Amino acid sequence: MSSQAATAPPTGVGPLLREWRRRRRRSQLELALEAGVSARHISFLETGRSNPSREMVIGLAANLEMPLRDRNELLIAAGYAPEYRELAYEDPDLEPVRAAIDQVLAGHDPYPALVVDRHWELVTANRGLGLLTAGVAPHLLEPPANALRLALHPEGLPPKMLNLGEWRHHILARLERHARVSGDPALATLLEELRGYPGEEVDEATVTAAHDVFVPFRMRAEDGTELSFFGTISTFGTALDVTVAELSIESFFPADDATAAACRAFAPR
């Protein structure tokens, strides 16, 4: 097991605050200036010589751009109740969110789009995703299906991908960045797993030298058609619920006319 995955997360409000400050590469002085307090006070909070108020915890967490889930954990470590609720995706109170997501997914048809949580587990998707997943091993699609595992597992998309090396580099670099800035051990474990799957090793310079605008996702469909997509990611920027804040909508757009035609043929309106 890697040292990243084996390292136990810090506990207590002081160690947690220090860990997040270091993840964000802020000095005590920089954080103090942003929070409107002294660097000495930040030092006292991190060492446990001072106890932060609830308002101070909320303010420091915001300055450190901590995810809502981690802000709640910081509050609990300081002895306060969580600030942000966490509802199940199926909760009736999230019906407007689900309706909005369904509208986005339906509007993107016939092109593939999916919704994932913070661990890239598949929450929902539109019909177009079936064009990408046709022929993959059924066990990879069983809940909770993981979009990144599906993309790199030997029984997933790799047998159909035409630029596996480029996308493997893209996925691993993205996941490594998220694992590092979040400190989430589940992401570190997933990263270790995905690195163990076979695939061509390419570096950033090779990828950027090969493309001018974006790195395409290229694959061969079941009928032999070569498909090329580029992707976008959307999130809920003003979410105050932990579940909603952790959702991402990943949408694929056709990079050429042949791909657009194949999508329309696969999922006609």
Image: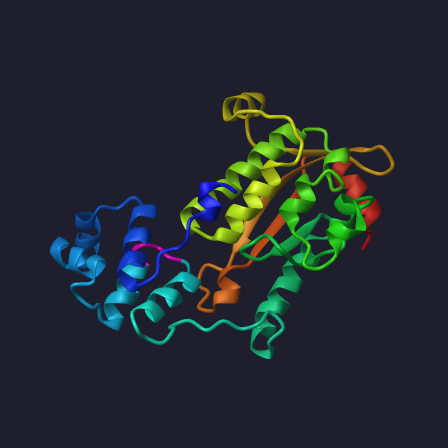
Asked whether 65 falls inside the magenta stretch, the response is yes
Q: Nearer the viewer, residue 18 or 247?
A: 18
Left or right: residue 155 compared with residue 192: right
Q: Which stretch is magenta?
A: 62-66
Asked whether 246 falls inside the magenta stretch, the response is no
Q: Nearer the viewer, residue 251 or 35?
A: 35
Residue shown at the point (47%, 69%) measured from the top left: 241
Q: Nearer the viewer, residue 3 or 195?
A: 3
Quadrant, the C terminus? bottom right
269 lies above or below 224:
below
Residue 193 sits in quarter: top right
Residue 253 at x, y percent in the picture: 66, 42
Residue 113 at x, y percent in the picture: 67, 51
* Residue 177 visible somewhere in the drawing: yes
* Residue 128 visible somewhere in the drawing: no
Residue 73 sits in quarter: bottom left
Its colouring scheme is rainbow
